[in-house]
Structure formats: C-alpha cells, structure tokens
C-alpha cells in the first residue's frame, strides 16, 4: 500500500532508471487503456507483458526453500522506490496527480487480480479488517445481494462483507452492489474493488501532502532536472503553447470547421450556427478548444455574442453569464487559473450530453443510427462509415476518429495517435500546408520527430546527469515523499 | 417593488430565520460564521462570500441589502468574508448538504402536454414519481433521514440532505450517489437511454414498482403516449435495436388507443423473447417504462461541493412563488399551483384581522410550510446533539 517511504541512498542514475521503468509501465497502462478496453484480453496481455519485464512483483510469500528470495526482495525494493520517486514528479498539478492516481490504481488492481489468492494475506499484512456479515443476515438478504452483484451460480456459498458505502464508491457508482441503510454488502469476489478504492484515496491524500513538501527538495538541482525530464517528455502537450502561425479568424471558422475540426467540435459548431444556442457543457468544451486553437479572448467573446444574439437580445445575453464564462476560461476572472482545452479522454469519460446537449464525443455519445446519419450528412462514403461503426462497436472511439481524419484528408494512415481535439486540428492544418508555431514544450507532431506513444524511451531522452558523479540522493527526498 | 420585498424579508428574517438559523448553523455559531451565502440583487449582481457571525447581523444585512434571491453554499474552513486576505487555494469548501435538482425541462422528450418552462397538473406527476423514487433510495439505500424537499418555484424540485454523514461527503461520494441514481443516460442523439445489465438491481425493481402505480394515469391517460405514429416510433426506439421494430410497422400506424397499443406492444415483446429464449425477458419493457418515467437528475448540481443552490423560502424571480418545502410522503397532495406568491403573502399579512401579537408568518398561508421547516431544522440539530443515533426520530 506504499504507506512507508523507503530509506537509504541511491545513485542518480538508479534514481532515473527505476523511475523511468515505472513511468513506462504507467504510460503503457494509459495508452493501452485508450487503444483497447480496460478489461479486455488484448489490454491485459500487452500491459502485463510490460509490467513483467520492467517491474515484476511477485507476492511476498516466504517459502522454505526460496531460491528466489533475493530477487524477490530486489523486485520489492525497486517497486517501492520507483513509486515514491514518481510521487515527487507527479504531485505538482491537479492534472498530474489525477493521471498518476488513475494509472497507479490500475497497476494496483492488475496486480491484485493476478494474485487473487493472496488477497487475504494482503489484508492481514496491511491490518485491514472488514466486518463480515453473519450467516443469518446473509440468508435474509441473499437474493438481494446476488441480484445486485450479478452472482448467478447458486451453488457456492458467498462470503459477504459489510462496509460503509463510502468505501465502495466504484461499486455504488455502477450500481453493482447491494446497499442498505448506508452500508454496502460486498461479496468477497468484489473485495478487489474495495481495496483499489482505498488505495486510490490514500494515494490521493499523500500526493497532496507531497506537493506541499516539494519545496524542501527543490534546491537539489539533480533531482529537479530529472523530475522535469520525466514529466514533460511524457505528459504530452496540453496545447496551451502551440499555435498556428497566423491567427484563425472567426470568419474562417465555418470553412475551417469542415476541413480541420474533429467531429466533436464540428458538431458543436454546426449546432451553434443553426440554433444560435449551445448549453453549458458545449460552451466549455468549444470555448477551450477555440482558445487552444489560438483565438484571442476578444475574438471568442465577439463570436459567442454574435451567435447568441441572433436569437436573444443583447440585454439578456449580458445577464446570461456566458460572456463572464469566456473571460473566466481565459483566466481573466475569479481564481485566474488558466484552463486547458479538454483532451479526448476527458471528453469521452466526462459528463456526457443529456437532453438538449451537443457536447461530448460523437463516437461515444451518439447511437449508431444517429452517428451514421451524421457521417452521411458529412459525405463520408458508406464503406468507411461501416468501418467506423465497427470501431465504435468495439469502443475504439479515438481510432474511429482517426479513421474519420484519414477519410477526410485522403490519407491511408493518420500517422499520429489521436488523443486531443487540438492535436487533430494542428495535424490537419499541417497536412493541408499551414505552418505550426512550436511552443515552449516543443510539440512533437507526426511530421517532425519520432517520439510517439510506445517508442522505447531510453534512446530519445538522455538523462541530463549521466556525466556528473553518481552521488547518493539525500535524505530530504525521503521525507518529502511521506 | 422595493417596499414589499423589504417587508417580506423583514418577515422572513423574524420567523423563518430563527428556524433557518437553527438549521444553517447546526446549532453551532462557529459553523454559521463559516457558511457562505450568496445574495442576488436586482440587475443580476451577485454578492458572494458573505458570511455572518450571528442571526442579528444576518437580519440587518438582509434589510439593508435587500437581495431578491439568496443561495446557500458550503461551509468553509475560514470565514468567507475574510477570504481575500488568505492565499488562494487555502479557502476551500469543507462540508455541505448533498443536494439534488430535478427540472421538468429534462422531461421534454417524454411529456406531450407542456414543454420548456411550462408545467401543468398532468406532467407534474413525473415530479411525484421522481420525488418518491429518490426519497426512498436516499433513506432505504443510503440511510439518510434528514431530507428537505423544496419546490423550486417554477418547474422543479430540490432536495437537501442534511445528515452529518452526507455533509461530510466529498465530490467522489456525491458523484457516486448521483451516478447510482442515474438511469436515463444520453443526449438527443441517443434514442435508447436505458439499458439494464442482467438481473435488475433491487433499487431498480423498487423504482419500477413505484412507477407502475402512476403509469396508467400518467402515460396512458394524460400523456397518451402512443396515439401518433411519431410517438409510437419513439417508444419502439427505446426497445433493444433490431429486434421487433420491423415486425411492428402495422402497430405503429394502427388506430387503437394508447392502452390497447401498450398491451399489444408488451405481448409482441413477450412472444419475441420466448421465441429467442431470452434471459430476463422483462428487462426490455422495464427499460421503456424507466426511460419514460424514471427521475432525470441534473447530476452536475449533486456532484459539485460548491454548487450554489437557491435557499428555501426564496421567491422565484419569474413566477413570484415562494420556494416552500414539502414532505415526500405527501407529494401526491402537494399542489405547486396553489403555492402562494410573494404578493399574496404580503396581502395576507396586511389583511390580517386576528390577534395582532401573532408573528407575521402565522398570518399567512405559509404557516404550515414554516412549521414543517422548523421541524426539519429541529431534527437536524437533534442529530448533531445526539450521541446515540438509534434514538433519532425519523423525519
């Protein structure tokens, strides 16, 4: 459960390499989670193979004649250290913390499931006790519990634990557990879910604490430069710095929406132009996208005002708060935090559209008939529509979108792994011949360098401290991790 | 007009506020001073981050500022009015009631008598169903007991869950409850919005039972939900795709009444399910019923800890009606169309000819609502005072 940070000294090269190994795994988890579905065979196979190579972790079962004892300890040590090192790297921003928590939780879950038989040992080891439901009570509620947790085989006797519902949020959220009077009745088969939930909560809290103590190590340059290398190389661009050379003007939007907008934004643009009104979710998603495109705040404000005021009068628009929202999203109001445009993951997994909404990801949020109609209207040939629908049925939304890109740009292969609407836009503009201004972080487009997705890391990014003398990392790092 | 609002708020201050104060502060002055209020003035000026150290301050400010809408926010870790003197980020929401917002416009897809801001006694039944289902779920499944249901003044209802365990929930807890209660999922581009996986969860079975008590009166009699080809197509698209849709072309255009057609549809599905030996063959019919009548929540209101929500007893700016509380168990007899408006309330006070020493609110038709609210506030205070939760009376 990573409650106690490791102690000791390690060299900077070891610092870098163990952290990198773990990061590669987390990155693999993230990417494969997009490509395949979490839970599917392919996902499991590809992720587990990465894990076994880089950070294997066999259960800590001490056998009498254990030849592997030494390697097992070595494995544990490496796993332990790399976890805490990455905490340092990913505790600084809300987004980083969320990404890290999600991936670590998934890693934890995968490992637990791989060794289900060890779960009870795990509980003992971490002093976790769950209240067992008495046989009488189980008999009473048996059908309810079975129905809720979809336990079909009537032969096995099920062991049920009773936990406050707040510790079983994943199950509650998906209505996969029986709850009564605030208690969740969790069959032992679902214990993994509870443990994963606890893991994540605990990690989340620790990360915030970690962020507060980060200043304590910020003057150790060796550490800071490694941490910076780790995060920027792998987080991908958040599109707050890359812009097109030459501004896109509001007048160009209708044309550009047809050629370079991904379907999600093209859809919102269409609805906006036809109905002169879009609801909250769409306003957020679209405004941030336009900001990522490089439109100025004034441009977006004017655009929104023009469009909305085709249907409502200026006074009502003034009262509506939409203008304020634009200013807020550009960081000029309230907390003055600079909001970043949503990536595909956020759009796909975030609050979907409900009645009257048009935001979200068309491949995820439209049903097959409606999607087909839309693609037809956009003049996609029938054969490709069928391919796209097939991908959607397999829940490969981003690949479906890439396919749309390929069809509309006449390319056999998109050449990039799609994970952000603004990325789609930039790639499209480049493909059409417009130049892209590379920002601070150095946007790696498919046309230039070769760093993408699952490429082996060690070749492209060299640890900046390899020349310096390998010095032990100080104790201050350890205390920061607590 | 200025003067009448001042009168209302003076009255609001004296009566409702004592009860309200008890609730808002959970009997703890320190809590009250850390609670954020937001006043809306005429001209849509929002005054946020207001907080008060005691009732008198609150009353005084109400009279001078004269807001026409008050919204209640979360408890914070420092006094909201001092927030500017602290570093940004250290001012955070600490606790807040769990709230739900149900709005009639979200039912426009399935109600045919009205749309948008309009409501009538026929479609109000959707609200009755929603209140019953959610109330049951919050009490039975989650164990909450201090629930306050409030009419929002125009076309919906709010629910405030004030139990201590609810107030302490973070965003993920609220999100989980909201998702647990969300069944109708999808926007306008999604025709079939309810899909049950396997055996229906007990809470869903319970909901179907509640709906069935109202279904005939609502969907068949008042909404006549199968009396046109368009309506029939819509219902057909709520069934699993590519099953009986093609076989029912005649059914769609036939001239029978909704009741007959509904029975017809159920039979057709039943035959199909038996033929294909489907497990859980009733699910498809449940899915249609649920898509038509299951509560449609605005989940964003529930999920956010700092979502501002209108205070009970506020006045709705467009209808003038007072946001009065009501009991879920009495929802069948609650009539939103007889809720008094601010004007009426003021007239009642002016026309009072009885005992002059009686507090203002007792002269009006708001009296029962205020009594109800006082009971609720008391129950909340008792919860906090009570060590032994078994003794807590069900509110």
Image (spheres, coloured by chain):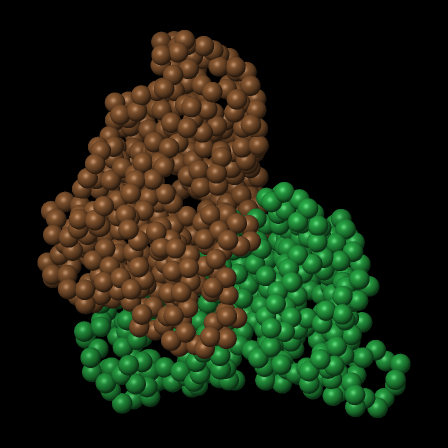
Chain assigned green: B
Q: Is residue B12 above or below residue A322?
A: below
Q: Is residue A345 above or below residue B262?
A: above
x and y percent of residue A429 in the render?
22, 50
Q: Is residue A348 visible?
A: no
Q: Residue at x 38, y 70 (%)?
A: A306
Given residues B353 and B372, the one toward you in this image is B353
Total marks placed: 0
Q: Residue at x 69, y 58 (%)?
A: B50
Given residues B64 and A345, the one toward you in this image is B64
x and y percent of residue A382 in the render?
11, 62
Chain assigned brown: A
Q: Residue at x 39, y 60 (%)?
A: A300
Q: Is residue A225 visible?
A: yes
In which image quadrant can residue B59 be found?
bottom right
Q: Residue at x 55, y 50 (%)?
A: A335
Horizontal side, residue B30 vs residue B140: left or right: right
Horizontal side, residue B381 vs residue A32: left or right: right
x and y percent of residue A132 in the render?
55, 39
- Name the image quarter holding the C terminus of chain A: top right
């Amino acid at each position: 459960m990573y409650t106690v940070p490791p102690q000791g000294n390690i060299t900077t090269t070891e610092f870098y390499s163990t952290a990198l190994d773990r990061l590669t795994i987390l990155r693999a988890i993230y990417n494969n989670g997009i490509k395949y579905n979490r839970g599917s065979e392919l996902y499991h196979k590809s992720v587990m193979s990465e894990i076994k190579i880089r950070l294997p972790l066999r259960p800590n079962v001490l056998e009498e004649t254990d030849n592997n004892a030494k390697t097992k300890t070595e494995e544990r040590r490496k796993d332990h250290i790399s976890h805490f090192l990455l905490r340092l790297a990913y505790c600084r921003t809300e987004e980083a913390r969320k990404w890290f928590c999600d991936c670590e939780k998934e890693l934890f879950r995968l490992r637990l499931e791989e060794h289900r038989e060890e779960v009870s040992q795990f509980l003992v080891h971490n002093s976790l006790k769950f209240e067992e439901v008495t046989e009488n009570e189980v008999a009473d509620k048996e059908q309810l519990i079975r129905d809720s947790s979809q336990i079909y085989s009537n032969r096995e006797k099920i062991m049920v634990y009773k936990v406050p519902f707040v510790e079983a949020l994943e199950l509650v959220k998906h209505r996969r557990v029986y709850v009564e009077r605030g208690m969740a009745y969790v069959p032992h088969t679902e214990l993994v879910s509870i443990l994963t939930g606890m893991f994540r909560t605990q990690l989340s809290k620790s990360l915030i604490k970690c962020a507060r103590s980060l200043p304590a190590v910020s003057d150790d340059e060796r550490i800071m430069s490694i941490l910076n290398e780790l995060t920027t190389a792998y987080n991908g661009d958040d599109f707050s710095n890359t812009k097109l050379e030459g501004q896109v003007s509001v007048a160009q939007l209708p044309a550009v929406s047809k050629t370079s907008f991904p379907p999600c934004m093209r859809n919102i643009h269409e609805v906006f132009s036809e109905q002169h009104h879009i609801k909250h979710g769409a306003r957020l998603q679209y405004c941030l996208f336009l900001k990522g495109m490089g439109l100025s705040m004034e441009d977006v404000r004017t655009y929104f005002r023009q469009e909305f005021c085709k249907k409502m009068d200026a006074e009502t628009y003034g009262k509506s708060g939409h203008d304020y929202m634009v200013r807020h999203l550009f960081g000029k109001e309230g907390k003055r935090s600079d909001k970043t445009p949503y990536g595909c993951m956020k759009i796909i997994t975030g609050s979907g559209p409900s009645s009257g909404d048009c935001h979200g990801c068309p491949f995820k949020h439209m049903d097959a008939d409606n999607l087909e109609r839309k693609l037809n209207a956009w003049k996609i040939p029938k054969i490709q529509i069928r391919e796209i629908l097939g991908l959607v049925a397999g829940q490969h939304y981003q690949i479906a979108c890439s396919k749309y890109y390929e069809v509309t740009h006449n390319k056999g292969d998109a050449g990039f792994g799609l994970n952000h609407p603004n990325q789609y836009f930039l790639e499209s503009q480049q493909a059409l011949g417009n130049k892209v201004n590379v920002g601070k972080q150095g946007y790696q487009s498919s046309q230039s360098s070769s760093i993408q997705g699952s490429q082996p890391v060690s070749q492209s990014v060299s640890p900046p401290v390899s020349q310096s003398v390998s010095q032990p990392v100080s104790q201050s790092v350890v205390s920061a991790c607590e | 007009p200025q003067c009448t609002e001042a009168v209302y708020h003076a009255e609001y201050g004296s009566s409702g506020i004592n009860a309200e104060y008890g609730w808002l502060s959970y009997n703890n002055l320190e809590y009250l001073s850390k609670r954020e209020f937001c006043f809306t003035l005429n001209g849509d000026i929002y005054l946020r981050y207001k907080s008060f150290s005691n009732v008198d301050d609150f009353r005084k400010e109400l009279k001078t500022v004269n807001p026409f809408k008050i919204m209640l926010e979360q408890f914070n870790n420092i006094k909201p009015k001092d927030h500017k003197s602290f570093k940004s980020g250290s001012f955070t929401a600490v606790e807040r009631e769990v709230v739900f917002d149900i709005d009639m416009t979200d039912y426009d897809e399935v109600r045919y008598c009205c749309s948008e801001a309009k409501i009538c006694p026929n479609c109000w039944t959707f609200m009755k169903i929603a209140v019953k289902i959610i109330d049951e779920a919050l009490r039975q499944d989650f164990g909450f007991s201090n629930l306050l249901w409030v009419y929002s003044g125009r076309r919906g209802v709010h629910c405030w869950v004030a139990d201590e365990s609810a107030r302490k929930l973070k965003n993920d807890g609220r999100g989980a409850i909201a998702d647990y209660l969300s069944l109708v999922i999808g926007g306008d581009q999604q025709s079939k919005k309810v899909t049950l996986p396997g055996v229906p969860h007990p809470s869903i079975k319970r909901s179907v039972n509640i709906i069935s008590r109202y279904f005939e009166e609502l969907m068949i009699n008042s909404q006549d939900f199968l009396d046109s080809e368009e309506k029939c197509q819509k219902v057909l698209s709520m069934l699993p795709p590519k099953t009986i849709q093609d076989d029912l072309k005649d059914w769609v255009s036939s001239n029978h009444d909704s009741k007959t057609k509904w029975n017809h549809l159920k039979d057709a599905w039943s035959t199909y399910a038996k033929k294909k030996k489907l497990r859980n063959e009733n699910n498809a019919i449940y899915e249609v019923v649920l898509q038509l009548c299951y509560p449609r929540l605005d989940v964003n209101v529930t999920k956010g800890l700092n979502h501002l929500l209108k205070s009970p007893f506020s006045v709705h700016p467009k209808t003038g009606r007072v946001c009065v509380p009501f009991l879920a168990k009495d929802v069948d007899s609650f009539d939103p169309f007889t809720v008094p408006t601010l004007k009426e309330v003021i007239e009642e006070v002016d026309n009072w000819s009885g005992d002059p020493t009686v507090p203002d609110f007792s002269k009006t038709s708001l009296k029962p609502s205020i009594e109800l609210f006082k009971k609720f506030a008391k129950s909340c205070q008792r919860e906090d005072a009570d060590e032994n939760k078994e003794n807590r009376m069900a509110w």
